[in-house]
Amino acid sequence: MSKLLIATANKNKVKEISNILSSSFKAFCTFSDFDLDSPVEDANTFEGNALIKARYGSTQTGLPTLADDSGLCVDYLQGEPGVYSSRYAKEGDDIANYKKLLKNLERVQYDDRMAFFFTSMVMVFPQGQEITVSGKLEGYISESPKGKNGFGYDPVFYLPEYQKTLAELDFQTKNRISHRKKALENLLPELRGE
């Protein structure tokens, strides 16, 4: 396939997705390349929000469109921030979001700070075919932010097997284990017709 619209304005997501799908597509573009605003994501599930974006992108551009909706789910907080991860603190700012999360987990013991990143990814083709996949990365919420790599909740998402937060990992390692990578690995066989 030649060109894929990645339905996001998030440059970090574009970099991560295009790096993984570079063997399947020759070129990548985003809403900004078409002067399109992102549609309102008002579904109450990750999959619902991804569907909204993917259908909108494909309809507006006539290109195959990949959209994801991702978030952090904390067991102790009954799945919060969930679909509201990017606007958890209302300001829509990464630092404000993870500070609110850390405040909500004050005095919560390590074993009760289990969390996972989840992504639902939807590919919509101009002919109407839709493929839905998902990916998950499990870890814990640290007591304080560490690391400069990554974005979102990466500085507070601790991976015991690495003894580091996601933001302390290099780009290659993060891409190898991320929830998006897992979803994209589930998508690749579908794209190849396997």
Image (cartoon, rainbow, N blue to C red):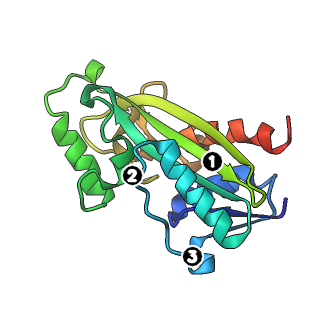
Under mark 1, the amino acid is Val
Q: Position of residue 90 (x, y in %)?
A: 24, 58
The answer for how far apart the CA atoms under marks 2 and 1 are is: 21 Å
Under mark 2, the amino acid is Gly
| Residue most extreme to the front | 128
Disc 1 residue crowd, few under 14, some 14–19, many 20+, Cα 10 Å: many
Up/down of 60 relative to 76, above or below = below
Q: Tell me which label, 2 or 3, sits earlier in the chain.
A: 3
For label 1, the residue is 122
Q: Position of residue 147 (x, y in %)?
A: 38, 48
| Residue most extreme to the bottom | 35
Which SS class for mark 1? strand
Residue 98 in view: yes
Under mark 3, the amino acid is Ser
Say which mark, if any, is on residue 156.
Answer: none
Up/down of 156 relative to 76, above or below = below
For label 3, the residue is 32
Q: Quadrant of residue 141?
A: top left
